[in-house]
Image (tube, rainbow, N blue to C red):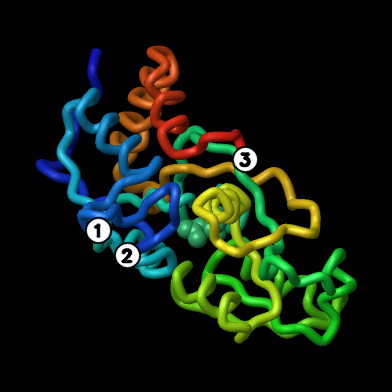
Amino acid sequence: KKIQPKKDSYVIASDSTFAPFEFQNSNGKYEGIDVDLVNRIAELQDFTIEFKFIGFSSAVQAVESGQADAMIAGMTITDEREKSFDFSTPYFNSGIQIAVKKGNDDIHSYEDLKGKKVGAKIGTESADFLEANKTKYGYSVKYLDTTDALYSALEIGEIDAMMDDYPVIGYGVAQKQPLATPIPREEGGKYGFAVKKGKNPELVQMFNEGLAELKRTGEYDEIIGKYVKDGS
Ligand code: GLN
């Protein structure tokens, strides 16, 4: 028996750019793993959605304030976030990693970040990691608003290193961005679709049912394979 939607349309907030999870293609249309998954799940489970690609920390605030019903934005399920959000079953395994400009030969460990400027996108797991370890390793942290701003800051040398989710860095490398990853990744982050704690429980159930169906039919693997070629 199918779960009944309780709203005519659900507003789903997302990041503005977080390829391969959400990004504008050459026609200006948003696509990516998160976009394709939610669109297919909504079709399978018979509910209507409207995406709003407003940026990661704006999406968090939109869900917390009730302006959006849910978010999907390569969002890592953390204990801290579980205090204010209910998450779906995890849909993607991820983790975070330091990246430097290709050709930079100075940085091989966190210790080598001493005295350097390291960037991360505001409100993210990478930002939290950098903040928590900055005294230990002696770097300073620069917060950028968007992934585009973060990667450009590295490219123009405004920061010496940055931290981001490794599938996103890997996608950049596959797109021939001049990046290198000299420090092993921090494994273990898993992405979830999130609603405000206690709100829209049927939406999470429909997401979970739809995700299970996409996994059963192999369509989940097709969606991932469309964007991630080498499992990186
Ligand atoms: N996975 C990271 C987090 O949840 C980054 C998400 C993002 O930048 N869209 O904080």
Q: Quadrant of the N terminus?
A: top left
Label 2, label 3: how far apart the Cα atoms are: 31 Å
| Residue 99 in picture, x, y percent from top left | 68, 64
| Residue 197 in picture, x, y percent from top left | 42, 51
Drawn side of residue 141 relative to residue 34, left or right: right
The answer to whether residue 187 is above or below residue 128 is above
| Residue 18 in picture, x, y percent from top left | 44, 57
- Is label 2 in contact with label 1 (beta carbons under 8 Å)? yes
- Is label 3 in contact with label 1 (beta carbons under 8 Å)? no
Label 2, label 1: how far apart the Cα atoms are: 10 Å
Sort mark 2 into few (<14), some (14-19) or many (20+) by Cα contacts within 10 Å: many
Name the residue carrying label 3. Answer: 232
Sort mark 1 into few (<14), some (14-19) or many (20+) by Cα contacts within 10 Å: some
Name the residue carrying label 2. Answer: 62
**Tag in front: 3 or 1:** 3
The CB of the residue at mark 1 lies under 8 Å from ligand 1: no
Return the mark for residue 159.
none
Who is closer to the viewer here, 49 or 217?
217
**Tag in front: 2 or 3:** 3
Local secondary structure at mark 2: helix
> Residue 208 falls in which quadrant of the image?
top left
Q: Earlier in the sequence, mark 2 or mark 3?
A: 2
